[in-house]
Amino acid sequence: MHRLLKMTLIVAVVVAGCTRAKPENEPELQAPPVQGEPAQATKRPPINRLRNAYFGETHLHTTYSLDAYMGMSRNGPDEAYRFAKGEPMPVPGGTARISAPLDFAAVTDHAEFLSDMYIATHPDNPRYGWEAAIKIRNEERSEQVGEWVFVNVVQNATRSGKPSELSRGALGQTARAGAWKEIQEATERHNKPGVFTTFHAFEWSSAPNGFNLHRNIIFRDAVVPDIPVSALDTNEPEKLWAYLAEYEKAGSTLLAIPHNPNYSGDLMFRPKTLAGGPIGVDWARTRARFEPLVEIMQIKQCSETNPAFAPNDEFAAFESFPIDSKRQEGRSNWVREALKDGLRIEKDLGVNPFKLGFVGATDSHNGTPSDIEENDWVGSHGFADGSPKKRLQEELQGWETIRRLNPGAIAGVWAEENTRAAIFDAMARKETFATSGPRIEVRLFAGWDYPDDLDGRSDMVAAAYAGEVPMGGDLSRAPKDKAPKLLIHAVKGPSGANLDRIQVVKGWLGADGNANEKVFDVAWSSGRSMDADGKLPPVGNTVDVSAATYANTIGNATLSTVWTDPEFDPGQRAFYYARVLEIPTPRWSTKDAASLGVAPPVDVPASIQERAWTSPIWYTP
């Protein structure tokens, strides 16, 4: 974390900290024993070459994150992984539990203050008795003490770009490495190939002028650096990529996932360097190599798009409220705008830096991965949102009115088996999808010759893979007189609401160089048809607002189609992704209002249509 360390020193540390890379054909057994745990080989289920849907968390904070600890969250990595496997866990808002275990999880604690947390919580550390360490422990559980820590540790460090006084020097570096090692040990303890997968990971939390440029760094295996790079080492994405390149040279395989970008102050997808300079081919290639995915939704709202930039998309306002802060202004905060800009940049440079697949996450600071059910959400940021009254009436300091936030989203991947290698490789090739919470399974393929009845055939998936490409892939050179055919298949979550419709979101680059977009309704639940203007009527709404309940009596459990683009131009660059909507269900704020016996707030929706998004497929002439 010491900002004055030269890159050469950091590289030396990284090389020393990396372990042997696993040979390609070596069997991957259960993690080696840690702290006396006996080694046991895990019998895996057979590999599915047609791939399974796995759900998990890619953005989570535990007590090793200073802001989580300040919020009175006391769940560490072990507790987080146990929660992911289905165990209930205490949180400041009560007790949390997910309705079904996850398949994978990554603890991504902030790299910036690992040393402060280690020093403050290890009595044998020489600085354990320093004032800042005492304040961090906050044994009085006082919000005023938390404010002191925020100002004197967090704010001073982030504004100066230097570590806090508590964590400076060699002792601070040692503490930082110690915290990272403890997180790694917990991650290894809980990794059970074929059953439950854990990833070594951390968050690089750059926020110049308060604009959020965070990235979550995910490693494919246990070849990791001794010390993770933090924003106190550099707050520039370009220099972050240089660190990641050095990690790769030392044997790591990794990727970076940009944090939900809607609060980035128009910086996350700006086609310039952080310093405002022009980009070139190398910049575009480097970004595309390290950042194949984006977090499309999390607790701090949805970043797909916003009505300000998608006025013709009737569902653009989902958990994306009117833009009313400098952090949210500008089109470079929004994923769909980035996808369109990528088409323009590719035309000019020959490389698309924004060819982004989608994942969802929570960014929970309670150590509760994928705690995303609306009906029993107990908050995500410790005492700040730990009661219905606080969630409905107060603000999450430095961010937003809590009632405009949400429980977050979940990542889905299509992989051959539940292992680090298989799930990471699915993320790297962008065969991923995101949902706003429900475990909707959705597949997207594109090809030129799919039969129109493929979505009803028993060999649908095998034929789809054989025909062309899954989500995250590329089509090129359209055969004469043919347009892309998209196979889309969606199944509602096991405990979720029925499905309303499937939409295709298309973006394309016109002959004038301008990027365009259009949303097509391509499949919908029975009992409706398009009107004379080509608009699909609403599915209906069974939500009882006063009771915060709904009836699952409308919509379909499964929707599928083979859709041919009716407006395809083989000379135009384009992308396609699918969006699947559920029928309306009560929003968490409506549930909280019902629990208090009050009317739900009028400035947020009483009901929502949860949804899933597939990663795009791109067409290049």
Image (spheres, helix red, strand yellow):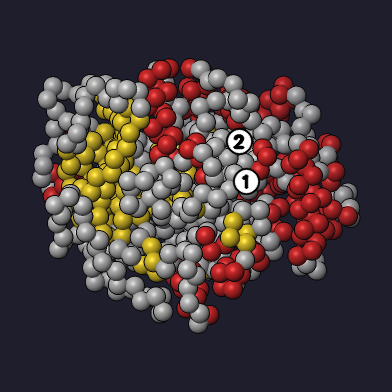
> On the image, numbered disc 2 is attached to which residue?
224
Circle 1 residues within 10 Å: few <14, some 14–19, many ≥20: some
CB within 8 Å, label 2 to label 1? yes
Q: Please, is residue 347 above or below residue 560 in the view?
A: above
The image's mark for residue 463 is none
Dot 2 crowding, Cα within 10 Å, few <14, some 14–19, many 20+: many
Check the image and report above or below for 591 versus 10: below
Q: Is residue 117 visible?
A: yes
Mark 2 or 1, nearer chain start: 1
Q: Position of residue 281 (x, y in %)?
A: 48, 17
Q: Nearer the viewer, residue 19 or 521?
A: 521
Place of residue 535 in the rendered image (x, y in percent of width and height, measured from the top left): 21, 52
Picture residue at 39% right of the left edge, 75% below the top? 545
Place of residue 420 in the rendered image (x, y in percent of width and height, measured from the top left): 46, 42
- Comparing 119 with 603, the one in front is 603
- Which residue position holds label 1? 184
Q: Amino acid at mark 1?
A: Gln
Left or right relative to 142: residue 255: left
Instruction: Judge from the rendering whether residue 618 lies leftward or rightward of residue 247; answer left or right.
Output: left
Q: Residue at x 52, y 55 (%)?
A: 299
Q: SS class of the residue under badge 1?
A: helix
For numbered disc 2, what is the local secondary structure? loop
Q: What amino acid type should be assigned to the residue bearing mark 2?
A: Val
Kindly report the distance in space between the C-alpha atoms of the residues bearing marks 2 and 1. Answer: 9 Å
Using the rendered view, name the quadrant where residue 390 is placed.
bottom right
Nearer the observer, 240 or 462:
240
Left or right of residue 21: residue 580: left
User: Is there any visible trace of residue 32 in the rendered image?
Assistant: no
Q: What residue is rendered at 33% in x and 65% in y?
A: 584
Image point 76% across, 40% down: which residue? Answer: 159
Q: Which quarter of the figure is the N terminus placed in?
A: top right
Image location of residue 411, percent across then percent down: 43, 49
